[in-house]
């Protein structure tokens, strides 16, 4: 009985994996673009999921890291004319580590709701800074255009949609593998403990603040990875990448996909991006509809897509007995 | 040092309410069973909270094995060998029994911050957990969610979490809370056998358990120590009888 | 900038602060009583303004439009409380925030659908549609009227809070919900009333403020961000503190937009960050649970 169940699950996973891997070259351009953006967003949402779903810290400041990394790429490639991808990526991630290390110490002084509000306020301040005081560097509202695809030093060019898609897919597989290791490690076990009962964790001898801090920086780094990919993918970076609305998007995608689950972020990115693309072609009122979808999810489908899938599995299990 | 715990002029005020007032006592490291009793509101749990570091005292000092821990955060006191359990069961609701225990075991292990290797690869933690669970006859239930255990079993898990890291001094806050009389005696027996080499300081309301386990009793009343001695001395003590007037005791 | 300019800008700031107060008072009360940060509050403000505008166009009666706007706000508040908030009491604070945010998205797009995105301006009522001379410069009388209205509302709310039974009940609820319930107070009813009152004031403010702020899509987000800053910086639990912070932020924002336009939002939110880190309860706030 369980052999049958686990085998249809693994067949399904293999099919989905194969689709991601093999189907893409035959799809039209817009579908390749869509698929690439979904995978980039799934890394972004996964990083937010690490902080929110697994450590229990609800943050409205993830866009700050995505945007800073994206802007680093944009500024380094188009203004400083640095073409070495590895150097650019390294600097971008370094920027993110520095920002998160600094803000983390401050933000983690406050708890729960206040943490959420302070990350929101930080993020807004950073957006304001990018918009005006740093306008010479960031070109403010207009943003930075013409970011060229990276040269990897291999014989493959990333200029085409399909080749860049595979590049993004490889990076995503690496990121998700690291997420997987983190979740299954003692550290991952501890942060979930902190999420569920921080008080007991402290009594057991855990330095909960340090765990949260590390989690904050890790989540920032992966948001940064996603932001770097995005800058190259989109070729254009503007302040909306730093805006709190985009931080909110991460939470929305997380909820829709299933907060605190491993594949939730991918489901969420898939559903959200797909729905937005499809619905936007019919109506301009995407935000209102997004709002309705989110309300329905929070009120009726609290486990998101992943939760729904798990409940279906449970129900099938009952029916077979 | 020869003292496991020393409390000097400890006091705690919540606003104008003095819950612990100018308390002083010490517990030698070789003492095994200290039971703190007292009517409700005497300040017993507040005393425990001060010792374990839930909040800072309004005045006075606390020493663990000679180290001044008065301003030390909770988790650092644990490093010195302190552990505590809670009156209201405070476990990890979404974890299985085994996962709960692993959390307690990995806390002081070098692998506590390990990120890349899976938890499952640290077999020494699983072995320690197996020893504890088998001794308590909970081995079969190790993969059950904590919510499916009975109340008595969860009180036992509370204690397991406390002793998992091999503490030298353990604060048990009403370990038999919510248990029937026979369950309480069963738990008392387990405590007696399990914690042979640990200095246990216990808050108890169940007098039969208290008198059964104690080698020393401290009676708290309105934030201060009213009596401190062997169970026999406490039994004979007139003041204690007055405090407990109307309450039956063995 | 010469002195007369400063004075008129400061007055503008005070008028704006009064409008903020209409929003922040309700927001602050909701947070204090229910622990809810209602991000849809800005949408009540905007929709109230639009509804009032429509009624004004149909009936040509400013007073009727005010009533309509306020009623629209109250109605939206009632709907929000009955159908959404009821289901979420006892759940995480962040979920209510996200839910109210989603609601504001829905209301915003609904407004876009009903009233289109072009900015609209409302004429002040005829008897207030003049300017008088203030230190040599013309100053619109309507703005002074707003300041007056704001003061009136503050006094009424203060009286209500301090001197009436209902006010005492609400204050009790803010201080200690469990105790209040234990005393037999119908807390859910109080919640609904507070919600509706806050939304009523928001809708009222949206229309009454429309001759000054105009009506455009995005107004809800702009205004809620400032109201949120007020509630955070000023803290909850003190009506006077709320008013003081509103005036402070109103003047800062107005002067800021004139003197250093691109730094206004940055400065205000930098202050928010500092307050959150140094004194999370806010400048005038009482201890938050």
Image (tube, coloured by chain):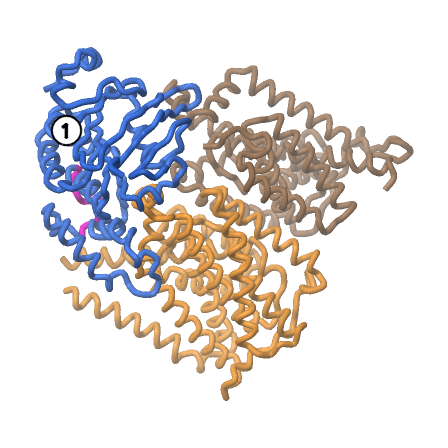
**Percent x, y for residue C187?**
42, 26
Start and end of the magenta stretch? B143-151
Residue closest to the eye, B125 or C146: B125
Chain with orange colouring: A
Q: Residue at x 79, y 38 (%)?
A: C9
Q: Residue furthest bottom?
A: A155
Residue nearest the viewer, comparing C103 with C20: C20
Q: Is residue B2 above or below residue A132?
A: above
Q: Is residue B53 left or right of residue A314?
A: right
Disc 1 is placed on an element classified as loop
User: Closer to the camera, A78 or A251?
Assistant: A78
Residue C182: image x %, image y %?
36, 21
Left of A300 or right of it: where is A281? right
- Quadrant for residue B85, please give it: top left
Output the chain of dot 1.
B
The shade of chain C is brown
Quarter of image, res B246: top left
**Colour for chain B in the figure:** blue
Q: Which residue is mark 1?
A: B214
Image quadrant containing the C terminus of chain C: top left
Q: Confirm whether residue B146 shows in the render.
A: no
Position of B166 with respect to C284 (left or right) is left
Residue A144 visible at all: yes
Question: Is C96 situated left or right of A147 in this image?
Answer: left
């Amino acid at each position: 009985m369980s052999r049958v169940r686990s085998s249809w699950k693994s067949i399904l996973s293999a099919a989905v994996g194969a689709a991601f891997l093999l189907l893409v070259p035959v799809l039209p351009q817009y579908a390749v673009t869509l698929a690439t953006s979904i995978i980039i967003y799934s890394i972004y949402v996964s990083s937010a999921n690490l902080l929110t779903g697994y450590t229990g810290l609800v943050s409205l400041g993830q866009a700050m890291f995505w945007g800073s990394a994206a802007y680093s790429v944009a500024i380094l490639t188009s203004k400083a004319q640095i073409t070495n991808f590895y150097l650019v990526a390294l600097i971008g991630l370094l920027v993110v580590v520095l920002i998160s290390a600094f803000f983390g110490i401050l933000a983690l002084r406050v708890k729960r709701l206040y943490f959420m509000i302070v990350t929101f306020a930080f993020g807004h301040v950073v957006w304001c800074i990018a918009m005006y005081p740093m306008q010479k560097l960031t070109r403010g509202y207009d943003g930075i255009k013409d970011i060229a695809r990276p040269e990897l030093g291999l014989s493959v060019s990333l200029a085409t949609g399909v080749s860049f898609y595979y590049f993004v897919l490889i990076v995503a597989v690496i990121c998700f593998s690291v997420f997987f290791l983190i979740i299954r490690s003692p550290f991952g076990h501890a942060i979930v403990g902190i999420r569920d009962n921080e008080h007991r964790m402290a009594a057991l001898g855990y330095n909960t603040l340090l765990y949260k801090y590390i989690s904050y920086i890790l989540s920032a780094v992966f948001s940064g990875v996603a932001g770097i990919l995005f800058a190259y993918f989109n070729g254009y970076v503007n302040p909306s990448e730093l805006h709190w609305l985009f931080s909110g998007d991460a939470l929305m995608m997380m909820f829709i996909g299933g907060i605190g689950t491993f594949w939730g972020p991918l489901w969420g990115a898939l559903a959200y991006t797909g729905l937005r693309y499809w619905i936007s072609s019919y109506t301009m009122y995407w935000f209102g509809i997004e709002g309705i979808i989110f309300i329905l999810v929070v009120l009726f489908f609290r486990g998101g897509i992943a939760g729904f899938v798990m409940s279906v599995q449970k129900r099938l299990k009952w029916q077979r007995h | 040092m020869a003292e496991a715990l020393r409390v000097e002029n400890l006091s705690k005020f919540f606003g104008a309410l003095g819950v612990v007032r100018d308390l002083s006592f010490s517990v030698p490291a070789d003492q095994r069973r200290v039971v703190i009793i007292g009517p409700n509101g005497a300040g017993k749990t507040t005393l425990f909270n001060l010792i374990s570091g839930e909040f800072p005292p309004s005045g006075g000092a606390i020493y663990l094995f000679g180290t001044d821990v008065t301003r030390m955060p909770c988790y650092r006191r644990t490093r010195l060998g302190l552990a505590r359990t809670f009156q209201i069961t405070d476990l990890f609701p979404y974890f299985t029994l085994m996962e709960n225990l692993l959390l307690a075991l990995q806390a002081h292990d070098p692998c506590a911050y390990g990120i890349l290797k899976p938890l499952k690869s640290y077999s020494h933690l699983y072995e320690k957990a197996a020893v504890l669970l088998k001794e308590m006859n909970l081995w079969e239930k190790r993969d059950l969610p904590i919510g499916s255990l009975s109340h008595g079993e969860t009180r036992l898990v509370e204690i397991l979490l406390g002793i998992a890291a091999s503490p030298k001094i353990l604060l048990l806050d009403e370990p038999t809370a919510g248990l029937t009389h026979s369950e309480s005696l069963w738990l008392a027996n387990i405590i007696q056998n399990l914690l042979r080499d640990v200095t246990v300081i216990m808050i108890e309301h169940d007098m039969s358990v208290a008198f059964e386990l104690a080698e020393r009793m401290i009676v708290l009343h309105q934030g201060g120590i009213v009596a401190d001695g062997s169970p026999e001395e406490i039994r004979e003590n007139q003041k204690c009888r007055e405090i407990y007037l109307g309450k039956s005791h063995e | 900038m010469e002195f007369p300019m400063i004075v008129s800008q400061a007055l503008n700031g005070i008028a704006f602060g009064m409008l903020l107060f209409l929003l922040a008072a309700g927001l602050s009360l909701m947070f204090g009583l229910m622990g809810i940060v209602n991000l849809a509050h800005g949408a009540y403000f905007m929709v109230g303004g639009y509804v009032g505008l429509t009624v004004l166009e149909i009936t040509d009666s400013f007073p009727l439009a005010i009533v309509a706007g306020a009623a629209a706000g109250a109605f939206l508040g009632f709907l929000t409380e009955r159908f959404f908030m009821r289901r979420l009491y006892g759940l995480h604070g962040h979920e209510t925030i996200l839910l109210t945010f989603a609601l504001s998205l829905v209301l915003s797009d609904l407004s876009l659908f009903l009233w289109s995105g072009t900015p609209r301006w409302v004429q002040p009522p005829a008897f207030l549609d003049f300017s008088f001379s203030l230190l040599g410069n013309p100053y619109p009388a309507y703005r002074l009227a707003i300041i007056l209205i704001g003061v009136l509302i503050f006094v009424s709310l203060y009286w209500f809070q301090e001197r009436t039974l209902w006010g005492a009940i609400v204050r009790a609820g803010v201080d200690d919900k469990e105790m209040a319930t234990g005393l037999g107070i119908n807390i859910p009813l109080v919640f609904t009333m507070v919600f509706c009152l806050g939304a009523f004031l928001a809708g009222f403010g949206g229309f009454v403020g429309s001759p000054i702020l105009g009506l455009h899509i995005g107004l809800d987000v702009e205004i809620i961000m400032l109201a949120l800053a007020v509630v955070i910086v000023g803290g909850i639990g003190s009506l006077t503190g709320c008013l003081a912070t509103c005036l402070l932020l109103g003047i800062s924002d107005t002067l800021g937009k004139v003197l250093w336009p691109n730094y206004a939002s940055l400065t205000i939110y930098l202050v928010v960050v500092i307050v959150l880190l140094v004194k999370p309860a806010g400048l005038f706030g009482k201890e938050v649970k």
